[in-house]
Image (cartoon, rainbow, N blue to C red):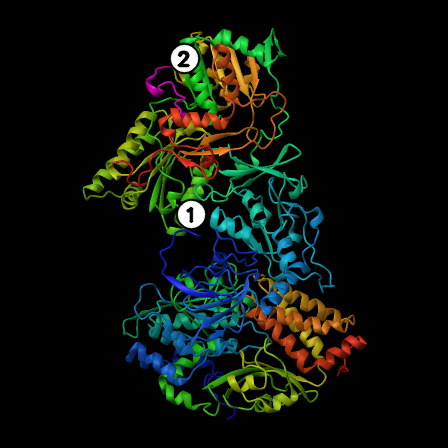
Amino acid sequence: MARKTDAPPVNITINGIDLQVPKGELIVESVKRLGLEIPIFCYHPRMKPVGMCRMCLVEVGMKQPDGSVRKMPKPQAACTLPASEGLVIFTDTEQIHKDRKGVLEFLLINHPLDCPICDRGGECPLQNNTLFYGPSTSRFVEMKRHAVKAYPLSKHVTLDLERCIQCGRCVRFTEEISGDAQLAFRHRGAEMQPVTFELEEFTSKFSGNTIEICPVGALTSSHYRFRARPWDLETAPGICTMCSNGCNVWFDRRKGKLVRINGRTNEAVNEEWTCDKGKFGTDWMNNPRRASDVKVRRGDGFSRADWAEAYAEILERFREGGHEVAGLAGPMLSNEDLYLLRRMFDETFGSSNLDHRMTSVQGPAVEPPSFTIEGLEDEKGAFVFGASLSDESPIVYLRLRKAWYRQGARICVATSRPDDADAFAAVSVRYPQGGEAEFLRSLVAELRVQLEGGRSFGELADLASTLLETRGPILATESLWNLDQAGEVLAQLRLAAELLGVSLNVMALGANGQGAEELGVRPDAFDRTGLGTRQILEACADGRIRALWLAGVDPFEAFPDRSLVQRALENVEYLVVQTALETEAAAYASVVLPITAPGESDGSFTNVERRVQAFEKAVDPPAEAKPAWRVFSELMVRAEPRTPHFSAREILAEIAREVPAFQGVEWSAARDGGVLLGARRPLSRARS
Amino acid sequence: MGEYKLLLRHSHDPAYATLDGYQRLGGYEGLRKALSMDRQQVIDEVKTSGLRGRGGAGFPAWIKWNGLPKQKTKPHYLICNADEGEPGTFKDKQLMETCPFLVVEGMTIAAYATQADVGYIYIRGEFVDAARSMRRAIDEAYRAGLLGKNILGAGMDFELHIHTGAGSYECGEESALMSSLMGERGMPRLKFPHAPLPTISGLWDSPTLINNVETYACAPFILSNGGAWYASIGASTKNSRGTKIFSVSGHVRKPGNYEVEFGTPLMELLELAGGMKGGALKACVPGGSSVPILDAEACQKAIIGYEEMMEVGSMVGSGGCMFLNEHTDIVEFIWRTSMFYKDESCGKCTPCREGTRWMFLILDRIKAGQGRPEDLQLLEDVCRQIDGRSFCGLGDAAAWPVAGALKVFRHEFEHYVRHGRSLVARG
C-alpha cells in the first residue's frame, strides 16, 4: 500500500511527537515512521482495511484552534483511521493497554491454546501479541466453542476452525487479491466461520497465500502440517522455478530436507505472494525418483560409474563433434549453467546445435520483453493475447488484476478459450483455435479503420477502441510458437503494436527461459548458425546427429511432438541425460548425470521482465548430484587445460564482463531484489 | 402534552391505505407544496421543524438532507430503513401497514430535496403484510403519476423499490443495511471519520440519504403545515420536536402503538396503555431492548424527550417501550435480551462477537444458579470491554442493557449468585 502518493502532507501528533504524513495515510502505517508498532490481526497492508479485530485501538483527539486537544470519547481503530490535519494519536495510554488486554482476552476465550502442537506456534501473531500486550490469565470459565478441526479445504489447505479468530484476512485475500472469492464467512456472531461456499473444494490457484497471511494456525498447509516447528527451521533465499515470473521465496529446511516454501517479499516481482504451483507443485522436492548417481550404459542396463569415467566417455563422443553433436537445455538451468553450456558447445564441441526452446516451431529471435511487473500497475490497460496468465504467468496475472482493482486499468483479453482474466477484463474476445492469424488481421484492419476515424460494430471494434484508448503493453507468451501460423501471428502482433505505439512482449515460460535467450542458448545467437530444437530432433532421428546432450530437460514432457522425440532418442547414437529426476528420457540415455534440484545450489535466473535474481543453496544435493555448470566447467578443463570455475558468483561476474546485456550485474544486487537487464524505456512507448 | 395523533391519526381507517382515501384526508399536499418550493427551501423547512431521526439515534434530519451534494455528479440514492428489528418496537410495521402513503410521500419529498433518483425501502423480511401494503401503495402511486417519470408534471423523476431483508437484526444498522442492499453479507461498513459519510459515499459509493420510516412519514406534515408549526409540538422539551410513536408492550392492559407529543411524562404513556397489569410497576425499558433499564422511581421522573430521557439514564431510542411489573425477574429479562444480542451479533468485530457470547454464558450460568460473586464484576468488565470498542452500535446496544441492569437492579443479581435463585416470587 505504501506506493508513491501525491497527497499533500498533514501535521499529526503521535504520543506527543509532531510529524508530517501524507493526508489519508492510515495511522497504523504512520506510527511506523516513528519506529512504533501497533498490534494488528486483521489489517494487512496489501488489502483494504476493515477494522474487524479491534486490536489496533488508539486514543484519538483533535487539536483545537487554541492548542488544546479534544479527545474523542471512544478509542478508534488505527488501521482504518486516515491521517488528517491536527489529528492527535495516543498509542501508549493506560486505557489503550487495557483495551488491548480486553481484545486479546476476547480472542483467547475461544482459541484452543494448542500452541504446543500448532504449526503456527513460534511464528504466530496471536502468540506474539498475547505475549506483548495480553493478559497473562483468562477469566473465562465457560465451555470453549468447539468446531471442526483438520477440515481439508483442498489437498493443499487444511482448516482448523477452532483456532480461527475471524479476522477475515483469507476471505479478503480471495476477494481482493486472487479475485476468485472462494472463501466467505458463513453463520454469524460467535459461530462465524470462513469456509468455501457449500464446503466445496478450495481450488483457487493462489490458495497457499491464505496459509501465510493467517494470523493463527487456522489455515495450515496439508503438506507441511506437523512436519516442523518454526524454531527448528533454517532457511535460504530462493527463486521459484515453476514459471518465468521469478517469485522470491524462502526455502525452509529441517535436518537437511526442504519442508516448505514461503513467499519472500520483493515489491517489484511477487510482492509477497506465491502461486500454488510454486508453493505446492514441487514434485522435485524429496522425490523418491531422484537421480543421484552417475550411470553409464553397459549392454541393456546401466552400471554406476564415477565422474571421470563418464567425462572420458562423453568427451570421446562430443569433442570437436561439430555439426554431428547437439544439445538441448532445460528451463530450470541457471544463468551460470547456460553460460557455460554455450561456451562448452562453442569452444569444446565446436557446435552451434544448441537450443532451449521446446515449442513446436523455433522462429527468429523476438525483441526482449520491455514491460516490468511492477510497472503494470501504472498502465491504463494491457492486451493479453493467447495466454492463460493465471496458469502461465500467475504473478503477472495478479498484477494485472491489481491494476484493474486498484486503478481501474482496462485489460483486454483475446484467447481461444475462456480464461480467468475474463472476470475483470474490460473486453474479452474469443477466436477459434487455429484462427489466431485471421483474428489478428481483422484486429489490425479495425485498428487502422479507427485510427482514421471510422468504426465498425461488434466486439472486435470494442476491443480495438479500448486498445486505442488505453495503449497498454501487448502480452503474449512463447507458446505462440506452437501455433500453426506462428510467424504470421507474430507479424500481425507487431503490426498491432506499431499501430498502437506500444510494446510487444513475448514472455518466456520456463524459470530461466528469458536467461537462455539473453545468453544465446539458441542456434542463431551471436551470428552463428546451427540447428534448432525440431531440426536437432529430426537430425537425431535420421542419424545426421550422432550425439545429443539433454541438459535438465525431458523432451518427452516438454516438446509437443512426442513421436519425433521417440524416434530421435531411439536413433541417436549417444545420449547424455543430465537430470534431477529419473525421467522418461533417462531410460534412453548412454550416460546419466545427476544435477542439483532447486534449492540445492547457488545461481541466478533471469525472469520474464529480464530481472536477474540470485538464489542460494538451501540444502545439500543428494549423493553425487552436481550443479550443471560444474559439470560443464570440469569437462572443459579436461578437454584443454584452463582455469576451472569455482562458484556461481564467479561465473555471474564473468557473464557480466562477457555478455553485454548483463553489464554491471552483481551478485549482491541480484540477490537483494534483483537487477533489471537493459536500459528500461517507459513502458507503453517502448517501440515507435 | 399527552397523546397527539399526527402520523397515526387515520391509521384506523382502511381507506387511508388507498390513494383515494389518503388524498381525501389531506395526502400529497406536502409533496405538492414541496414541488412548488425550491430544494433548499424544503430542507430549510425540515430544519425549522427540528425533526430528529426516529430510528434511535435522534440525529437532526435536516443535516443529512442537506449533506448530499448540491451539484450532482453521481446518482443519488434514498433509503428508507424499515428493518425494524429492535425488540419491543413495532411502530414502523403499523405505519407501513396502515399509512403506507405517508412513507411514499415522505420519501418522494426527500427525493425532491436531495435530487435522489432511486429509493429503496429495506423492509424486515418478517414484515410480509407491511411489504404487501407498501407494494400496493407504490403500485398505486406509480399508476397515478406520483412515482416514476415527471411526478405531478413537475419534471421530477423518482423510482421507488422494495427490498425485503433476510432476518438479520444487524441489517437495521445503516451501513450494514447498505451492504445487504448491495448483495453483500450484512456487515457494517466503515464510518466517519474512517470513511466518508453516506451522504457523500453510501450505496454503490454514491451520495445516499438514509432515514427511518417514521422520519420520512413526518415529512408530509412538516411540508403541508410548515416547519414552524411542527416545531411548536413538543416545544416544552429541550431539543425534541413533534410527536413520537411508542410501541408499548409488557405488563400493560392495552399494549400497542401510542403517538405522544415530546414532553409527555413517561407515566402518562403508561396510562394511555391502560396502566399496569398483574402488579405494580417495577421497571421500564423505554426505547427498545438496547437502552438502559429504568426502575420505578426513575420512571416517575422520566419525560419523553431525547435529552430529558438521557437525564434519567436512558434513551428514547426507537420507541419500543416495555413496562415490567413487580413480578418480573430482571436477571431473566436481561438473560433473554442478552441471548438476542448473542444471536444477532454479525461476527465482524471481536468485542461484539466474543463479548456477547461470553456475557450470555455468564448470565446463563447465573440464571441456572451457578453464579459466583465475582461474576458481577466480570460482567461489568466485559460490558466495558465491548462498549465503545465494537465496530458498530450493536456491541454498545448489547452492553448497555446488561450494564444498566447491573447498576439499577444489582441486588437481584447478588441474590442470584448468593442463593442460586431469583429474588422475585413468580406471580
Which secondary structure, mark 2?
loop
Relative to A538, A41 lies left or right? right
Residue A351: image tag = 2
Q: Which residues are magenta?
A: A516-530
Residue located at (20% from left, 43% from top): A454
Residue B424 in the image: x percent, y percent?
76, 82
The C terminus of chain A is located in which quarter? top left
Nearer the observer, A268 or B415 = A268
Residue B252 in the image: x percent, y percent?
63, 86
Residue B378 in the image: x percent, y percent?
70, 70
Can residue A637 be seen here? Answer: yes
Tell me, yes or no, whether the highlighted magenta stretch contains residue B75. Answer: no
Residue located at (73% from left, 80% from top): B412
Tell me which amino acid carries mark 1: Lys
Label 1, on which residue? A402
Which secondary structure, mark 1?
helix
Nearer the observer: mark 1 or 2; the answer is 2
Cα separation between marks 1 and 2: 46 Å
Disc 1 residue crowd, few under 14, some 14–19, many 20+, Cα 10 Å: many
Nearer the observer, B275 or A687 = A687
Nearer the observer, A361 or A637 = A637
Picture quadrant of residue A451: top left
